[in-house]
Image (spheres, helix red, strand yellow):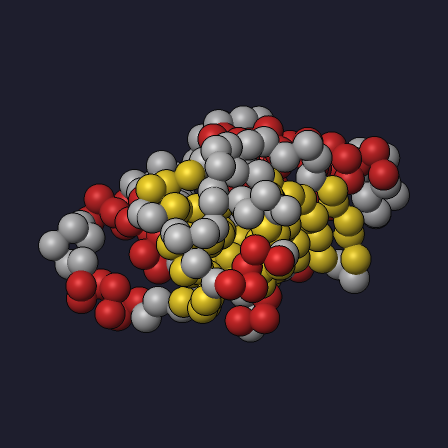
Amino acid sequence: MRKPTLAHAAILTGGLLLAPIAASAHPHIFVEARLEVLAGPDGNVQELRNVWRFDEVFSSSVLMDFDKNTNLKLDPDELKEVGKTVRDSLADYDYYTNLSLNGKAIKVDKPDVINVDYQDGQLLMFFAVKPSEPMPLKGNKLSFGIYDPTLYTSIDFPSDNELTVEGEAFKSCKHQVVRPNPDEVIAENKATLTDAFYNDPTGTTMSKLFATRIDVQC
């Protein structure tokens, strides 16, 4: 049986390319991530810089799908096509970005480009997204996380050092990386975590309760 491909992932997150397939409640794609939250000189969140490294099985599937000239590597134009596919397909999911300002969810704008590379058998993506509305730091509580609401993709931060804040405005803030305990989340939310949560291929906002994030209080 062929492994899930980037085109399959696009179906589950953007409705593109292939006939729909059902997503189960466990991940098929594994990503090691880094997130840098940058504050601008005006005291607002300026952008979130992402680095995603995909697992070797998924990466090899992408190679099979996008290696149009069958030279067993991804040439610059093929890497560009991978980036364009992901940029288009993840738009409705805010590129797995979960932002909040004093509890209010904030959406993000479409990135200018998603840069892609293929190194040592693994696909890498580099891109930045900007909040769609101002996120002032001073006097506010903010939260930043990256997660897939469909649970099809597991996004992991190998260490707390992979979630960082940068910029002068952050120097007057306190921040901490939060890694929720799944058992505690389930126990605290058992009244709302129903069978539908585990079977709904469109995803649910409840999945953010399990996501690693960085909380900031300024």
Q: Which residue is found at the position 50% from the left and 32% from the top?
A: 132
> Residue 59: in sight, yes or no?
no
In front: 74, or 185?
185
Residue farthest to the left? 191
**The C terminus: image quadrant:** bottom left
Q: Is residue 163 left or right of residue 125?
A: left
Q: Does residue 43 appear in this view?
A: yes
- Which is more toward the observer, 177 or 51? 177
Picture layout, residue 126 above or below residue 211: above
Where residue 203 appears, as percent x and y from the top left, is: 35, 41
Residue 144 place in picture, x, y as percent: 46, 53
Task: Please name the residue shown 18% across and 58% down the image.
Answer: 189
Q: Is residue 24 above or below residue 160?
A: above
Rendered position, 186 above or below 144: below
Asked if residue 20 lies left or right of residue 182, the reply is: right
Residue 151: x and y, percent?
Answer: 41, 50
